[in-house]
Image (cartoon, rainbow, N blue to C red):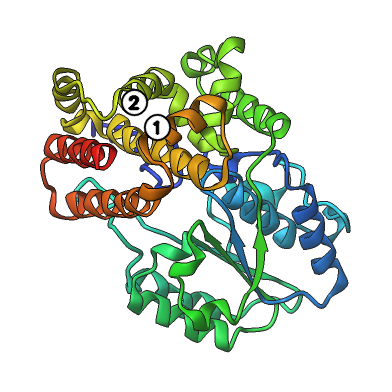
Amino acid sequence: MARAPAVQEIEELPEADRLDGFPHPRATQRLFGHEDAERALAEAFASGRMHHAWLITGAEGIGKATLAYRFARHILADPSERTAHSLDIEPETRAARQVLALSHPGLLVVRRAYDLKNKRFPATIPVDEVRRLKSFLGRTADENAWRVVIVDRADELNISAANALLKSLEEPPPRTVFLLVSSAPGRLLVTIRSRVRTLDLAPLADEPLRRAVTQAFAGSGEEIGSAAPAASDWDKLGRLSGGSVRRLLALHAAKGLVLHERISTLLKGLPAVDWGTLHALGDELSGQAAEQRYELFFELLMDGVARLINAEARGEGTPDEIALAGRLIGPARLATWAGLWERVAADKAETAALNLDRKALILDVFSRLEAAARS
């Protein structure tokens, strides 16, 4: 008797826009804090005179991709399932289930696909990914059927891919909508920006941020869901998150409040530097397993320096930030610190591109901070 074939488990591939342990934006049912944007899209679609391409911009992690997928479900749903002033579509409808599974014939998502061979994501969206548009848009569709193209994120397109997308934007087929998601729209080709209608989303205020984070934890696994932030941590996490759900989740998961306190202590100690502590921190963050905490360290450090610059330039910030800025920066050194911030950002990008030593970068950054504080 022949053996029955072994049952193979289907591996769920990583997705660039998904934070480990939490639902992907297309699986997020509710969008908080962007009611005006949702209403604008719903009413534009209901009017029958909708622009064919939208650029959804704003800070990372505030709901741009969630909005794009909600709008895609709305467009691809049966007309009887839509309302004129809301993007809500019941999750059990056929269109909603197909969008969730990325199996709807009227949906194409252009993004950085996971490289199984090298076990990583490419740095940019290659032109071959955009070339899939040709066959997708060339298919014969039912007379009343819509097609939706989501580009997430558009600022990750390489130059060839951007030019290939531009050709489709210039001559879009009827009943086709392009939704371009971007946290850095300035990186897009001017010719692309001139052919889209921009919808800019603001960072979330405290209440919608809490509701969105609560939803994310509720949609995660039991182990993660039971580790939601303590009530005493909400205010600090909310302030450090800058109104971003993704950043708040990452902060909490990577024990970001502890890391923030260590960075704050180092900044407050300037122009003196506790090199022993810094060497230990560099060792802790230099390994591949510490990728998330390394990235978070630089996010918090750059944000802390930016806050000090802003406190000195505009007098905005907490009393402690304003006092520290006055001691370390002062009006005479404002340009020096602003230049330092830009140099650190460039050095970090170069370290990532050339796979340079992370600890050496951390030590070098604080050497520069020490010199700037002493000058």
> Residue 297 in the image: x percent, y percent?
32, 32
Q: Residue at x 56, y 87 (%)?
A: 170
Q: How many tags in the picture?
A: 2
Q: Quadrant of residue 80?
A: bottom right
Q: Position of residue 318 (x, y in %)?
A: 56, 28
Which residue position holds label 1? 327
Which residue is situated farthest in the front direction here?
332
Q: Residue at x 67, y 48 (%)?
A: 96
Please tell me whether mark 1 sits on a helix, a strand or a loop: helix
Residue 239 position, x and y percent, is 57, 30
Vertical position of residue 257 compared to residue 42: above or below: above
Q: Say what secondary structure mark 2 lies in.
A: helix
For label 2, the crowd category at 10 Å Cα-Cα, with few meaning under 14, some 14 to 19 and many 20 or more, is some
Front residue of 116/327: it is 327
Relative side of 246 to 179, left or right = left
Residue 179 vs residue 213, the one in the foreground: 213
- Tag 1: residue type? Arg
In the picture, which quadrant includes the C terminus? Answer: top left
Q: Amino acid at mark 2?
A: Ile
Residue at position x 41%, y 76% in the image: 162
Indicate the quadrant containing the N terminus: top left, top right, bottom left or bottom right: top left
Is 137 located above or below residue 154 in the figure?
below
The answer to whether residue 342 is above or below residue 175 is: above
Q: Earlier in the sequence, mark 1 or mark 2?
A: 2
Rendering coords of residue 340 (x, y %)? 30, 50
- Residue ID for mark 2: 263
